[in-house]
Amino acid sequence: QVQLVESGGGLVQAGGSLRLSCAASGLAFSSYAMGWFRQAPGKEREFVAAIRWTTSYADSVKGRFTISRDNAKNTVYLQMDRLKPEDTAVYYCAAAPLVADILRIGKYDYWGQGTQVTVSS
């Protein structure tokens, strides 16, 4: 059974930093692209970042967020710096086949339960 478990969310002031982690089990981790998505109250879930052999970022987080992965630990990370109140959301990690269009939410096969990030002004 595939499990993705996010951690590292919390409350932070604007301008601060958080590091999210997502530990994967039950899948061949190195054979999957990994992505981070977020969903704010009343809004649709949106793409944040993804990693396979390259990295991709939403324009809204480019230059502030960094995605990375450690295949030996089956873990993907999202380092979030210079956080803004508009970054407040539930953050989800997800896994997609390496050849998938990783910018499209529908291409992800597995999802975590999410972790709350709240940025105060």
Image (cartoon, rainbow, N blue to C red):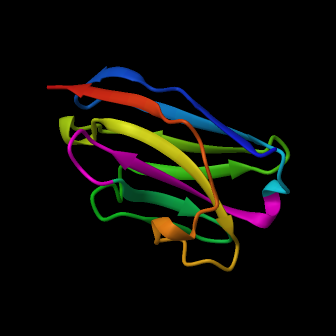
When the figure is inspected, residue 4 is found, relative to residue 48, above or below; the finding is above
Above or below, 3 relative to 18:
below
The quadrant in which residue 4 appears is top right
Furthest residue toward front: 1
Q: Is residue 69 left or right of residue 87?
A: right
Q: Is residue 80 visible?
A: no
Write down the region rendered in magenta: 30-44
Which residue appears farthest toward the left when viewing the image?
121
In the image, what residue occupies the spot 30% across and 27% down?
A: 118
x%, y% of residue 32? 73, 63
- Is residue 59 in sight in this rendering? yes
Front residue of 1/31: it is: 1
Q: Position of residue 27 (x, y in %)?
A: 83, 53
Numbered circles on residues, count: 0
Q: Residue at x 40, y 29 (%)?
A: 116
Q: Nearer the viewer, residue 117 or 13?
A: 117
Q: Residue at x 62, y 77 (%)?
A: 100
Q: Residue at x 38, y 47 (%)?
A: 38
Q: Is residue 93 magenta?
A: no
Q: Looking at the picture, does residue 2 appear above or below residue 99?
A: above
- Side (left or right) of 25 relative to 55: right
**Relative image position of residue 84 (x, y in whole percent):** 22, 38
Q: Quadrant of the C terminus?
A: top left
Quarter occupied by the N terminus: top right
Please indicate whether residue 42 sits to the left or right of residue 108 in the image.
left
Residue 11 rendering spot, x and y as whole percentages: 33, 19
Image check: 2 left or right of 43? right
User: Is residue 43 a member of the stretch shown in magenta?
Assistant: yes
